[in-house]
Image: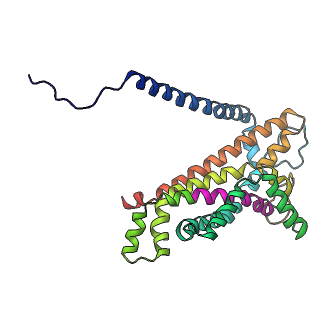
Amino acid sequence: MSAPMPTGLRPVPAVRRAKDRFVQALVCLAFVLAIIPLLAVLWMVVRNGLARFDLEFFTHSMRGIGARDAGGGAYHAIVGTLEQVLLTSLISVPIGLFTAIYLVEYGAGGRLARIVGFFVDVMTGIPSVVAGLFILAFWILALGMPFSGFAGALALSILMIPVVVRSSEEMLRLVPRDLREAAYALGVPKWRTIVRVVLPTALPGLVTGVMLAVARVAGETAPLLLTVFFTDSINHDPFHGPQMGLPLFVFDQAGRPSDTAIDRAWTGALTLILIVMLLNLVARAIAWWRSPAKRGS
């Protein structure tokens, strides 16, 4: 029986193994500490939100419902939130995506690209109430436009654009340069390479970035307080008149001195979480369906 051949590898010292296990334990502990608050918040929202999670809540507004009255719902706020988030996305996603394409594909560290990147970083740190104050002062007071869902969408766009820019920029930078050079070698113009090669490759990451930005603005209350105003009635037109939103609905109901209003606030918060989750799932399904790997199979 022949002796085993030496491999030249020395056994791992016990001290090194102990350090590795210690670091692994710290990572697991950090994960647990990070996930506990999230699970606690979700548990509280679900447990308290189920009290009014019924058909009436999703089909009725608060028109004619007093602070202490039972019943009523958030249909007007759900419609307002969906329309405001849609308008915000229609404004922010093209601007943010085109800006990211310029920074990655055309700017190449130029002076204008550095200036744009600086202002994007500044906009990332703008407090939400400042965005609302700007639209209130410029759009409503200076130009004389009415309180509306569109005014709220403009304020939310100020918050959403820098998030879309930064997330899209990082996803575009992850696309291998070999794919671009292969397209250039075949004589494909740069704009067509971006449209047909770069964007489809980065599509799953781009969708994830957009959904993070949507989740960022969907729960904002301060900009809506200053631009949308309060209403208990259903308003399907986001361009005319006050329009409620789910964050405003939760804020309004939570401040009323009755248990029925508090229950409506919890259910409104649960509904907002479910809407963001549903939008995320739909966007990820579309990204998976349109991904190059799926189309190539």
Q: Can the viewer see residue 142? A: yes
Quadrant in which the C terminus is drawn: bottom left
Q: Position of residue 226 (x, y in %)?
A: 86, 55
Quadrant in which the N terminus is drawn: top left
> Is 233 on the left-hand or right-hand side of 4?
right
Q: Position of residue 153 (x, y in %)?
A: 75, 60
Residue 236 placement: quadrant: bottom right
Q: Does residue 12 lie above or below 270 as drawn? A: above
> Is 148 on the left-hand or right-hand side of 53?
right
Give the camera-side residue of 135 and 84: 135
Return the residue found at the far left. 1
Q: Position of residue 115 (x, y in %)?
A: 66, 66
Q: Does residue 6 lie above or below 255 as drawn? A: above
Give the camera-side residue of 49 and 124: 124
- How many tags in the picture? 0
Q: At x 73% / y 36%, what residue is drawn?
A: 49
Q: Main secondary structure of the magenta part?
A: helix
**Which residue range is magenta in the image?**
149-168
Q: At x 89% / y 38%, what residue is drawn?
A: 256
- In the rendered image, residue 141 lying in the magenta stretch gets the answer no
Q: Can the viewer see residue 290? A: no
Residue 110 placement: quadrant: bottom right
- In the rendered image, residue 151 lying in the magenta stretch gets the answer yes
Q: Position of residue 162 (x, y in %)?
A: 67, 58
Colouring scheme, one of rainbow, by chain, secondary structure, one colour: rainbow
Give the camera-side residue of 219 and 171: 171
